[in-house]
Image (cartoon, rainbow, N blue to C red):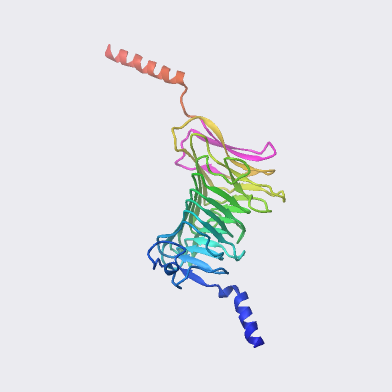
Amino acid sequence: MAPIGLASLLVFANPASAVVYVWTNGGGDNDYNTDANWDLGTAPVAGRNQAHFNSFGAELSSGSPAVISAIRIGYDGTDGDFTQSGGTLNVTNNSNDASRVGRNAEDGTWNMTGGTATINAIQVGLNGGGNTSVGTMNVSGGSLTISRGVAGASLAVGFGGVGNFTLSGNAIFQSRNVVTVGMSGTGSGTFNVIGSSVGGGPTAGTIGIGTAGSTDGIWNQGANGTLNMTIDASGVSTLFIDDTTQGIAAANFALGSLLGLDFNVAPYDGSFTLMEVENGDVTDSGLALTGSTDPNWSFAVDNSGANGLLIGTYLGVPEPGSISLLFASLGTLLVRRRR
């Protein structure tokens, strides 16, 4: 009996024995918690197991599913999506496993509009077998915490494929350590922040990079990476790179990396803190504005204080006196033409 017991223990201890649960929506109600919606006849059970979404319509709106190892969306030969609008999602069973959105020419979309999610690590937009996928993750509500780092990052946007990651609304976001955007040699990554209501950092209106744990935050943006910041009537949420304990918090922008700046309200003049590195510097090795950015925008790096800053400035709204002078000039021209 001993050898049988030992063999059983080895099977359960071996990560290769992890079970993959594939979403089918066989029950027809789109509910993650419904057993009939999964190919094995049961929703994923606790363990080093994975949930794969290779079709559409899956949603978690309530409840607390079993703790698993990874979520994979658009991963096994077909496109897919997954939405969390409520409930509590915990995907932390294996600290060496990453959740993935879009791989091997398949497209994946992960939407979060509410609830709470804690995930080991997330890779958005991967390359597999020479094929490029499109991965999209939209977090417009709820609270997302990336609690670990896998393959050098808590969040990798554009991990060989095309990755798009967007924070908007009242979403709360925290990463344990590194965020990379467009760092791979192929594909591209785009990180979008829309408006001033996104949270997760140490103060209101800040987003936490490195705030979810005991390691420091780092922002690495490669030549294929774009950071887009959209300003609303109150400004924009600042990406706060947290210096937790190690003193290595940093933001690095490679030659060829891009910054896009825009408004979702009528443009107004002002300066906006886009990124702040606690007790560290912003290193600009060739950041440039995107071609679609209004030429009235400019940006600057300021490392003169304790915290390094990336600041965007818009100067393009005419002064009231200038507008009056313009209309007066036009009136003079019209009089002259009538004569």
Quick one: which residue is furthest to the bottom in this view? 1
- Identify which residue is drawn at 49% across, 44% down: 169
Residue 257's x, y, as percent?
54, 47
- Identify which residue is drawn at 62% across, 83% down: 7
Residue 328's x, y, as percent?
38, 15
Above or below, 107 against 329 in this view is below
Above or below, 302 against 119 in this view is above
Quick one: which residue is furthest to the left in this view? 338
**Which part of the image, by quadrant, shows the C terminus?**
top left
From the viewer's side, name the closer residue of 212 and 151: 212
Left or right relative to 137: residue 211: right
Q: Is residue 294 magenta?
A: yes
Quick one: which residue is furthest to the right in this view? 246
Quick one: which residue is furthest to the front in this view? 63
**Which part of the image, by quadrant, shows the N terminus?**
bottom right
Q: Is residue 13 visible?
A: yes
From the viewer's side, name the closer residue of 53 and 74: 53
Left or right relative to 209: residue 292: left
Q: Quadrant of residue 131?
A: bottom left
Above or below, 277 against 60 in this view is above
- Identify which residue is drawn at 42% across, 20% down: 323
Residue 329's x, y, as percent?
38, 16
Residue 182's x, y, as percent?
53, 53
Q: Is residue 299 magenta?
A: yes
Magenta extent: 287-314
Left or right relative to 339: residue 257: right
Left or right relative to 237: residue 80: left
Q: Is residue 107 visible?
A: no
